[in-house]
Image (tube, grey):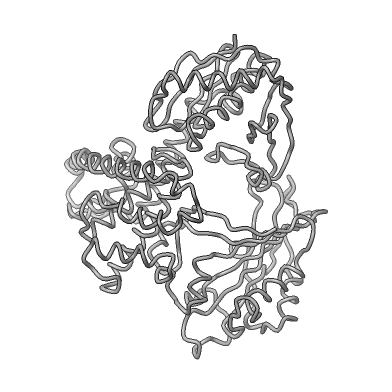
């Protein structure tokens, strides 16, 4: 199996601004579930990279890494020897530790294994070092083969898996840069139209200075990520995926300010992204107005919150000794109470002659996450999924919630995702992403669809899969939560398919009549339904 998937990653957001890092990127991959393994995967990777029939990259500019081994798991001698037999010099095969060449498990236990990464020398062809040093930034990682061959048990030991799998990932943006002889992803056709638009808006040139170049890269990357997130149904908020969207839009705005770009200009670059990718990802073209509306509204909120945040910052400033730096705790407070971004707080601290503490961002992120966890914990039920108990009535309402989510997405659109739930034996309370109040007609239609599925007496079927397999099958989930490597999927005759721990009834005919009692706002961009079974 081979695919190309959209990816959002913010774990290394501080690296974005250099030539090769992104929050949004497209990942090319090939997979094997118990079919081919290490020998074939590595040989085919090398063939794809170097054969004249495929990418035809210069072998002299390639290097690889393998897992070095440690006290828990052995050196990946097999991968080392395969690369060596393919003609790769031992000086170009780096043996690296787990932090570089190991994947998983997703939790404390589960499938995991070594990986082997491939690097391309992005500098001058006549200056390629004889030996590979992964600390040299001119060596750019372009592909990674992950070999799932172990299971980490409860005792922390690595046991061989009966079925060995392969999962590879090749960054499209980096590979395109390499194929075009570029050492900067932002000069490729995937980014350059955006850069030109930002040049037009700012009146500055990309090569004007390193500061300008960094700002333009961040704006281009972040607006692309924002467009794809909104098209996939994410609405800005202070939690989960919504927080990711809000963070990147506000970070883009911060760097627009550095370039003196007029406020309210992000919709222009968004148009470039939609035009460029719309024929490939049709949900971009189908959601043009929604995408631009969300961006414009967020820009307005930012400007308003910055005004309020400035007042709050002045209070913090007034109560601190002169010259004392602003802390991460204070930044988290300003974000939680006035949505003042960490970057804006840092900028204000500099303007007020204070600066920030050395661990400013780390502490600010940590305190913000603690706040979000406490908020979710306070509103969650005692049991998984927000269930108050495991009674028959609660199970019925839990199953009804699955039907309702599928009906909401059918009536309102695919931007609808579960944002939280609390289910008792008497009623269900369900929060979902939607920017406006539901009309009486929409509420009635959702009730009709759910009751049709109840009357059809559909079977409720459970199967256990890996998380990746579940996602590949299109199962819905609350992906802000941390799932294990294996998950349960509850399916209802092709109408509903969700990752869920249960419990549920065995047939929808057991439910009774579904009735929505109330629909109201829960928070910005989130609605709440209270419903019963009569």
x then y, percent, for residue 451 = 61, 17
Quadrant for the N terminus in the image: bottom right
Task: Identify the residue at image location x=47%, y=31%.
Answer: 412
Quadrant for the C terminus in the image: top right
Residue 456 located left or right of residue 286? right
Question: In the image as oriented, which residue stretches furthest toward the top?
Answer: 534
Residue 308 located left or right of residue 60? left
Task: Identify the residue at image location x=70%, y=16%.
Answer: 509
Residue 383 located left or right of residue 22? right
* Rendered view: 458 above or below 62: above
x then y, percent, for residue 461 = 74, 30
Q: Nearer the viewer, residue 131 or 235?
A: 235
x then y, percent, for residue 157 = 75, 52
Residue 68 located left or right of residue 380? right
**Residue 130 falls in image quadrant:** bottom right
x then y, percent, for residue 489 = 68, 35
* Rendered view: 481 above or below 427: below
Task: Identify the residue at image location x=67%, y=17%.
Answer: 455
* Rendered view: 428 above or below 365: above
Task: Identify the residue at image location x=60%, y=76%.
Answer: 55
């Amino acid at each position: 199996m081979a695919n190309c998937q959209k990816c959002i990653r913010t774990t290394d957001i501080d690296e974005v601004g250099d030539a090769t890092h992104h929050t949004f990127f497209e990942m090319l991959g090939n997979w094997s579930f118990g079919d081919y393994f290490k020998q074939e995967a590595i040989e085919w990777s090398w063939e794809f990279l170097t054969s004249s029939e495929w990418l035809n990259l210069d072998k002299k500019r390639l290097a690889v890494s393998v897992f070095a081994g440690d006290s828990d798991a052995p050196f990946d001698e097999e991968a080392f020897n395969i690369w060596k037999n393919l003609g790769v010099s031992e000086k170009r095969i780096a043996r690296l530790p787990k932090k570089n060449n190991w994947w998983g498990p997703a939790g404390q236990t589960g499938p995991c294994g070594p990986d082997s990464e491939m690097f391309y020398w992005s500098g001058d062809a006549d200056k390629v070092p004889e030996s590979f040093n992964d600390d040299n930034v001119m060596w750019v990682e372009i592909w990674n083969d992950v070999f799932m061959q172990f299971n980490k048990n409860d005792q922390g030991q690595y046991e061989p898996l009966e079925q060995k799998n392969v999962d590879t990932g090749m960054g499209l943006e980096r590979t395109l840069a390499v194929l075009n002889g570029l050492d900067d992803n932002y000069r490729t056709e995937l980014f350059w139209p955006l850069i030109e638009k930002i040049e037009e808006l700012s009146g500055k040139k990309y090569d004007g200075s390193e500061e300008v170049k960094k700002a333009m890269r961040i704006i281009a990357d972040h607006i692309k990520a924002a467009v794809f997130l909104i098209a996939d149904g994410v609405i800005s908020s202070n939690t989960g995926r919504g927080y990711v969207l809000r963070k990147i839009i506000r970070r883009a705005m911060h760097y627009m300010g550095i370039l003196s770009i007029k406020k309210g200009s992000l919709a222009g670059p968004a148009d470039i992204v939609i035009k460029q990718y719309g024929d490939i990802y049709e949900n971009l073209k189908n959601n043009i107005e929604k995408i631009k509306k969300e961006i414009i509204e967020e820009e307005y909120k930012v400007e308003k919150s910055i005004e309020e945040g400035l007042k709050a910052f002045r209070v913090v400033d007034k109560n601190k000794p002169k010259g004392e730096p602003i802390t991460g705790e204070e930044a988290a407070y300003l974000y939680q109470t006035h949505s003042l971004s960490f970057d804006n707080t840092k900028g204000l601290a500099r303007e007020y002659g204070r600066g920030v503490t050395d661990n400013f961002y780390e502490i600010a992120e940590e305190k913000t996450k603690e706040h979000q966890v406490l908020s979710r914990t306070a509103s969650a039920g005692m049991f998984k999924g927000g269930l108050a108990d495991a009674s028959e009535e609660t199970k019925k309402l839990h199953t009804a919630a699955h039907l309702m989510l599928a009906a909401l997405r059918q009536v309102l659109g695919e931007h609808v995702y579960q944002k939280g739930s609390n289910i008792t034996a008497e009623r269900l309370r369900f929060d979902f992403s939607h920017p406006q109040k539901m009309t009486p007609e929409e509420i009635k239609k959702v009730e009709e669809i759910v009751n049709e599925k109840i009357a059809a007496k559909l079977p409720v079927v459970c199967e256990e899969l890996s998380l990746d397999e579940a996602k590949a099958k299109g199962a819905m989930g609350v992906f802000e939560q941390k799932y294990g490597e294996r998950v349960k999927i509850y399916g209802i005759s092709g109408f509903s398919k969700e990752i869920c721990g249960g419990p549920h009834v065995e047939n929808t005919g057991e439910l009774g009549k579904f009735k929505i009692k109330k629909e109201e706002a829960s928070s910005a961009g989130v609605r709440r339904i209270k419903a019963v079974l009569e």
